[in-house]
Amino acid sequence: MVVAGLTLVSFGTACSDAPPPGSDATEATMAADPNDIGFPRVEPIRLYFAAHSDAYVDGLLTTLGELVGKNTDEATWEKDSGVHLWRLQNRLERARLSDAQEARVGATFDSMAVAHPDAKDYLEHRKWMIQSLGIGRVAPEIEGKDLDGVEFKLSDSRGKVTVVVFTGEWCGPCRSEYPYQRLMLELYEDKPFALLGVNSDGDIKVAKQGKVDSRLPYRSWWDGHAEKNTSGPIATQYGVTGWPTIYILDHEGVIRFAGLRHEDSLKAVAQLMAELPRPDTSGN
């Protein structure tokens, strides 16, 4: 089957545990307890991020120190070190940090701020990002206007599995996500699911037309104010320097996955949708 430009392959069905033809099970037995099959239930395949090892975190911090230490011009230190700090965050946000590991990361940033006082505010923000945008953290609030000029907030989607994607029509890799986004919207129509964009196109007309042409009627903040502006207030708050940047939140607003692309994002959303609390039908 082809849906929204994706080919889906189905490997049989798992709708029931009916016995094969010729078995000794009787209709009466099945009706009495259809869930008693002897075997334990098959657990769903799950995506998860393990905790970072101490050796890995310490290795990243050592590498960071070596790389930024090569930048000796204080006038350009912040600019020259930015890519290394972004790469550190990109790696740290793929798994959970322990309290001790986070403290070591924070101490490293504090030491850099002492050594490079002109970059103190910048380093404080980068430290905040690592502390606030990690797996297991409630995503920082996003507030702004959508493409029609209407204010809305990220917390408005609390109670729903939410995908936040920093995107733009100018960005080729961003457009490669569109078929998967269309499929999400189709699969979870009328379900507790939200796909929200942070659009960095410099021209709001381009952003709006792109949503129409790509058949992606999800709500987006407009975060662009100049041609291909990637330094809007929301992208700056989240420290985004690579597009697309994607965060997948559970129904409580907690960041559960970061950096997943294409079919991996579909799997992550399916997992979180399966974790949603079931409505109470007992009447109590």
Image (cartoon, rainbow, N blue to C red):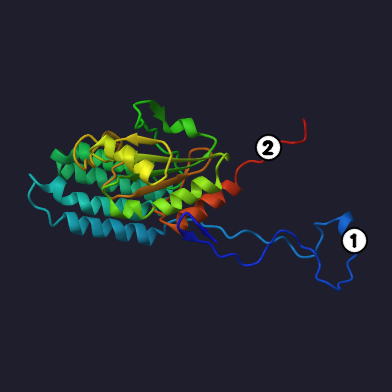
For the C terminus, the quadrant is top right
Pointer 2: what residue? 279
Q: Which mark is residue 249?
A: none
Kindly tell me whether residue 148 is visible in this rendering. Answer: yes
User: CB under 8 Å between callouts 1 and 2?
Assistant: no
Q: Residues within 10 Å of mark 1 (few under 14, many from 20)?
A: few
Q: Quadrant of residue 145?
A: top left
When the figure is inspected, residue 20 is found, relative to residue 260, above or below; the finding is below
Q: Quadrant of residue 236?
A: top left
Q: Residues within 10 Å of mark 2 (few under 14, many from 20)?
A: few
Residue 107 image position (x, y, % from top left): 29, 45
Residue 101 image position (x, y, % from top left): 38, 51
Residue lying furthest bottom: 22
- Classify residue 194 as left or right of residue 42: left
Kindly tell me whether residue 199 is visible in this rendering. Answer: no
Residue at 15 percent of width and 47 percent of height: 79
Going by the numbered disc 2, the residue's amino acid type is Pro
Going by the numbered disc 1, the residue's amino acid type is Glu
Pointer 1: what residue? 27
